[in-house]
Amino acid sequence: MHDELMKLSIIKSSKHGKVRDIYDLGDTMLLVTSDRISAFDVVFPNLIPDKGKILNGISVHFFKSTSDIVPNHLISDQVEDYPAELHPFREYLQGRSMLVKKTRVIPFECIVRGYISGSAWAEYKRTNTVGGMMIAEDMQESQKFMNPLFTPSTKAENGHDENISYREMLSHMDEWIARTLKDKSLALYSYAHDILKKQGILLADTKFEFGSIGGEILLIDECLTPDSSRFWALDSYEIGSSPHSYDKQFIRDYLNGTGWDKQPPAPNLPQDVIDKTREKYLNIYKIITGKELS
C-alpha cells in the first residue's frame, strides 16, 4: 500500500518510524499506524493483528479528551475529511490513520513516572536515582512515588533513546519550552491516572512527544497507548511485584527470558506471544474507549 500512496502527487515525501508511517502532504501530514511491534528500540518481523487500529483509536480518544490541557496536532481521523486523493484508500486508512498538523518536532521524549518500574527501577537499584534525581526513600518495585516524576529522554531516529536529567534537557532549549513540556506532561499524566484508576487501571508511566507551530507547543505522535504507557490492573497491584499489565511489558518479559542481546536483528515471536499481546491491547482499548474494536 505504501508504494501506491507514494504515487500520489499530494505526497511530497514519507518516513517510516518503528510503528508509524508518516506522509508529508505539504501543510499537513498523514500518520498511518501499522501493526508492527518494537521492543528495546528494535522492530520485530512479526505483526500484531489490529494493533495499528488499537493505537490510533486510543490516541484519537485522548487527543480529543485532553485538548483543554494542551493543544494537539489532530485534524481528523475520518478519511472523508482527508484530501480527495486519499479517498480511494479508505478501506486501508480508516481506523489506523489521522490527518495532523505539521509541526517542528521537539526531539525529546517526555516521560512521566508515577510508579517505579522498568528502566527507572533498574537505575534506582544501581544508583538510588531515577532520571538522575536522588530518591531518598527506600523504595520497592512498583511502589508509587510521592509525586509523579518527569524523566525525559533523547529521541533517537535509530538505535536506543537515552535517559537524561531535566537539567540536561534544559541545556538544549529555552527554559520556557522545557518548563512547558514538563508542566503539560505532568498535567496529562495526572488527568489520565485519575480517569483510568476509576476504570480499574493504574497508569504506571507514560511518554509524550511535542512539536511546535508558530511558537505554540502541541502534543503530537501518540497519546497514552499501550505502546507508550504501562497500564496495570488495579486489582492485581501489589508493591514488590510486577502487576498484571495491558501493554507491551508482556513482550519485554518474554524477551528478557530468551537470552536475546536486544540488538538487531530481532527474533521471531511465537504465535502465543502474538495472540496474548493482541488480547491485552484489545482489552485496554475497550476499557479506555468503552467500545469494541470495529
Image: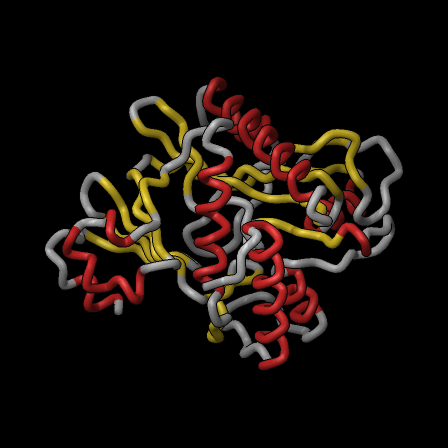
The answer to whether one can see residue 247 in this image is: yes
* Residue situated in front as seen by the camera: 33 or 195: 195
Which residue is depicted at the point 54% across and 79% down?
Answer: 268
Which residue is depicted at the point 66% across and 43% down?
Answer: 196
Q: Residue 111: which quarter of the image?
A: top right
Classify 45 as above or below 128: below
The answer to whether one can see residue 204 in this image is: no
Q: Residue 258: which quarter of the image?
A: bottom right
Residue sticking out furthest to the top: 176
Query: Residue 1 in the image: x percent, y percent?
Result: 26, 69
* Residue situated in front as seen by the camera: 15 or 5: 5
Classify 8 as above or below 142: below
Query: Residue 4 in the image: x percent, y percent?
Result: 19, 68
Query: Residue 27 in the image: x percent, y percent?
Result: 20, 39
Look at the image and tell me in which quarter the C terminus lies. bottom left
Which residue is depicted at the point 59% across and 42% down?
Answer: 163
Which residue is depicted at the point 15% across and 56% down?
Answer: 85
Give the total number of marks visible in the rendering: 0
Query: Residue 173 in the image: x percent, y percent?
Result: 45, 25
Residue sticking out furthest to the left: 9
Q: Is residue 227 left or right of residue 13?
A: right
Residue sticking out furthest to the front: 291
Looking at the image, what colour scheme do you see? secondary structure
* Residue situated in front as seen by the camera: 240 or 231: 231
Residue sticking out furthest to the bottom: 271
Q: Residue 247: which quarter of the image?
A: bottom right
Q: Is residue 20 left or right of residue 196?
A: left
Q: Is residue 230 left or right of residue 180?
A: right
